Amino acid sequence: MSAEPLALRGRLLRFRDNPGAVGPAASHEYVEDGLLLIRDGRVEAAGAAAELLAGPARDVALVDHRPHLLLPGLIDTHIHFPQTQVIASFGTQLLEWLETYTFVEEQRFADTEHAARIARFFLAELLRNGTTTAAVYGTVHAGAMEAFFTESHRQGTRMIAGKSLMDRHAPPALMDTAQTGHDESAALIARWHGTGRQGYAVTPRFAITSSEAQLEAAGALLAAHPTCWMQTHLAENRDEIVEVARLYPWAEDYTQVYERFGLLGPRSLLGHCIHLSDRELRRLAESRAVAVFCPTSNLFIGSGLFDLARTAGGADPVRLGLATDVGGGTSYSMLSTLGEAYKVLQLQGQVLDPLTAFYLATLGNARALGLEDRIGALTPGSEADVVVLDARATPAMAHRMERAARLEEELFVLMTLGDDRAVAATYVAGARVENSPPTP
Ligand code: GUN
Ligand code: ZN
């Protein structure tokens, strides 16, 4: 956190609400010559540069980012930190992909030194992509999770993370037990949940790799620690669903497995949610759980097309998150993720307009995490995580921008052609991050 106050000047864009709910005009605030005044890691004021520079920002160090855009730091609601060397693994769908690549790689995280090195790479890569908060899966190893939180705490990033609970259908080296998984999670919660900007997510990986006893233990952890999050995978792949039906013959459907063990609630983040029945969608809506759309992953592992209109539209909408799901996903960039979300919806005759897209990557994902009072909107008093975006970052983008007159067009160029190259700077709690590539 920077002790000295700081003023950032640029084209300020913040969302107030979902454009789908309140209309495009009321959804956001855009100040062409804007200023963010930051003190003690928080936003003190945000508004017109002329006014603030004549008043409270008068003697404050100024960084002029014009003509770039200033937005809240981007938020990724589902990503795996042990999969930075799994990303771009060829030729398989979910269950084979897990066995062939992921469960092999994750065994390396028994080595805490390795985990610490990967945590440094992972956080640097997120920040280089303008992502300042993420909901993060670890491996089964408590020591690796400790290394991750230690690094995130040192850097001051707001991360929600948890060690994976896995007590069956995985290599022996990747398994805990219902009891050890519970106890290690409880110890990590005691040490890290609410320490600085760190938060804990109880993380049963998915129904296939947890016994009923383990899911019950996960439910007990959540009941004992109601401010923790819960993250898991749900209805990503058809073979996965067949296997879940075999393992839980009493369950009416996949969602009921999690429901039975008290794992559905407003702090539950459910990755994928592609193949769900009407009953399941209704239960997700009623429980206020969050369906997390991971477009690059769904395309890359061939899982299917997330039906946004059916899931988050209609009379009984399910809350929505948007995420990369690296390493099933193929990009750390939430900009690329928005572009791929647009294409997934195009294939189904649906549209993701650019204002809604940028709402989702900022305030929408903050709301999905229940953190909208702290991050995602740069409101006074909130934490000063900021991304500076340059829509002319590459020759192709600059060339295309010659024909872009309106803000919406610029945002669409950013989500269609942009990625880490469009991130001119990232600030974490008011401190500028050195955005050079991390050591591999
Ligand atoms: N389901 C269970 N584990 C995983 C994982 O690591 N990635 C994805 N995409 N799906 C999963
Ligand atoms: Zn995942």
Image (cartoon, rainbow, N blue to C red):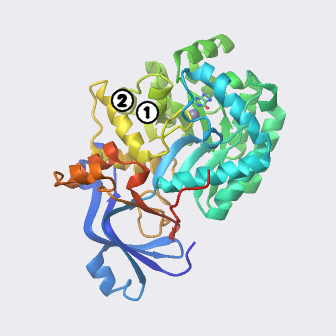
Check disc 2 and report its element: helix, strand or loop: helix
| Residue nearest the observer in this picture, 334 or 285 | 334
> Is the residue under label 1 in contact with that under label 2 (CB below 8 Å)?
yes
Label 1 beta carbon less than 8 Å to ligand 1: no
State left or right for residue 409 relative to residue 80: left
Q: Which mark is residue 242?
A: none
Residue 28 at x, y percent in the picture: 29, 56
Visible residue check, residue 40: yes
- Spot occupied by residue 242 in the image (x, y as percentages of width and height): 58, 12
The amino acid type, in three-letter code, at marker 2 is Val
Q: Which residue is mark 1?
A: 295
Distance, label 2 to label 1, CA atoms, is 7 Å
Name the spot of residue 327 as percent of width and height, x first: 56, 36
Q: Which mark is residue 344?
A: 2
Ligand 1 sits in quadrant:
top right
Q: Nearer the viewer, residue 394 or 290?
A: 394
Q: Is residue 390 above or below residue 7?
A: above
- Precedes in sequence: disc 2 or disc 1: 1
**Residue 389 x/y as whole percent:** 36, 58
Is residue 375 shown above or below 324? Answer: below
Q: Is residue 62 left or right of residue 137?
A: left
Residue beneath the point at 51% across and 35% down:
329
The crowd level at tag 1 (other Cα within 10 Å; few <14, some 14-19, many 20+) is many
Work out whether 95 lies above or below 214: above
Which of the two residues, 433 or 235, is positioned nearer the viewer here?
A: 433
Please rate how many residues cluster around mark 2, counting C-alpha atoms within 10 Å: few if below 14, some from 14 to 19, many from 20.
Answer: many
